[in-house]
Image (tube, rainbow, N blue to C red):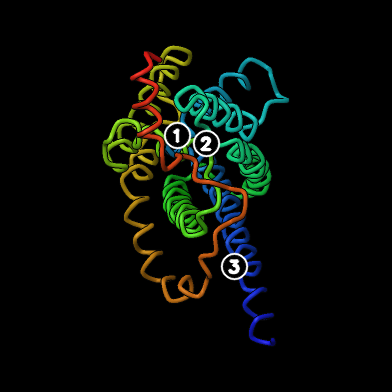
Amino acid sequence: MGDGGTDARRPGKGVFARVVLMVVGVLLVGMAVALSKHALTGTTPISVIPAVVYDLLRDNGVATVTLGMCSFAMNAACLVVELVLLRRRFPVAQLLQVPVVLLMSASVDMWMLLFEAIPNDVYPVQLLCTAVSVAVLALGVYLQTTADVLMTPGDALVSVITRLTGRTYHKVKVAFDVVLVATGAVLSLLFFAELRDVREGTVLAAVGTGMVVAFWARVLAPVMRRVPKDPVPGIPAVVPEDLDRSLDENDDRGM
């Protein structure tokens, strides 16, 4: 009976551990976004548009808007696109992406306040902040991926597009980042007549994050192997397993 009781408790412990990993990962991503903005060398690709909009609003006297708010709006737009693409196949439980991105947005604003104490008017310090932001971003992404509970809407949208198009995740991710950075650059040139938030730090984040994620995977693999891979009750994958068949059926019906 003792063994049975132990087995019965394991799934709960596994789920709790994975949720903790996800939360820590989300907080670290928020930290990375804030630090990349503070570094003044260009933000991460997913944050370029929110950062440009944030600068535009601040320059026009809208002091109540925060970078976290703009990040939330960007992710909310990604969630809407998910809903449009998946239609009735969108798992309702994946609306829990909303509290996840709320947590990340709050984390961005918290870290933005804390980083104000760090001087950012010297280029070597800016580069150091940029490098640290990439390392922290990669760690946050790795922890969220390992947890495999929920994704932020931006990452979830990439997964949806990957499944719908049949392309590889890497190719879709690169194309997605290019579109975000290009859009942010156009907005920046349009409203500021200069490039803001799109600089060498943006390129470093786009190119280096994947490599640093691989580094964290090697370093932390012995620890992460101890985390049980119990399924999280009530939270299906953002892309349903039968999506391909469902879309084929809809096409046959003329939908």
110 above or below 66?
below
Dot 2 alpha-carbon crowd within 10 angstroms: few under 14, some 14 to 19, many 20 or more? many
Cα distance in 3D space between marks 3 and 2: 24 Å
The numbered dot on residue 102 is: none
Which corner quadrant holds the N terminus? Answer: bottom right
Helix, strand or loop status at disc 3: helix
Residue in the foreground of this view, choosing between 239 and 168: 239
Which corner quadrant holds the C terminus? Answer: top left
User: As shown in the figure, which amino acid type bears the numbered disc 3?
Assistant: Gly
**Residue 78 % position (x, y):** 51, 28
Q: Mark 1 highlights which residue? A: 157
Determine contact: label 3, label 2, CB under 8 Å.
no
The numbered dot on residue 14 is: 3
Asked if residue 166 lies left or right of residue 77, the reply is left
Dot 3 alpha-carbon crowd within 10 angstroms: few under 14, some 14 to 19, many 20 or more? some
* Residue positioned most to the right: 64
Comparing marks 1 and 3, which lies closer to the viewer? 3
Residue drawn at the location 50% of the way across and 24% of the way down: 87
Helix, strand or loop status at disc 1: helix
Helix, strand or loop status at disc 2: helix
Cα distance in 3D space between marks 1 and 3: 26 Å
User: As shown in the figure, which amino acid type bears the numbered disc 1?
Assistant: Leu
Residue drawn at the location 51% of the way across and 65% of the way down: 229
Determine contact: label 1, label 2, CB under 8 Å.
yes
**Residue 201 % position (x, y):** 39, 41
Comparing marks 3 and 2, which lies closer to the viewer? 3
The numbered dot on residue 153 is: 2
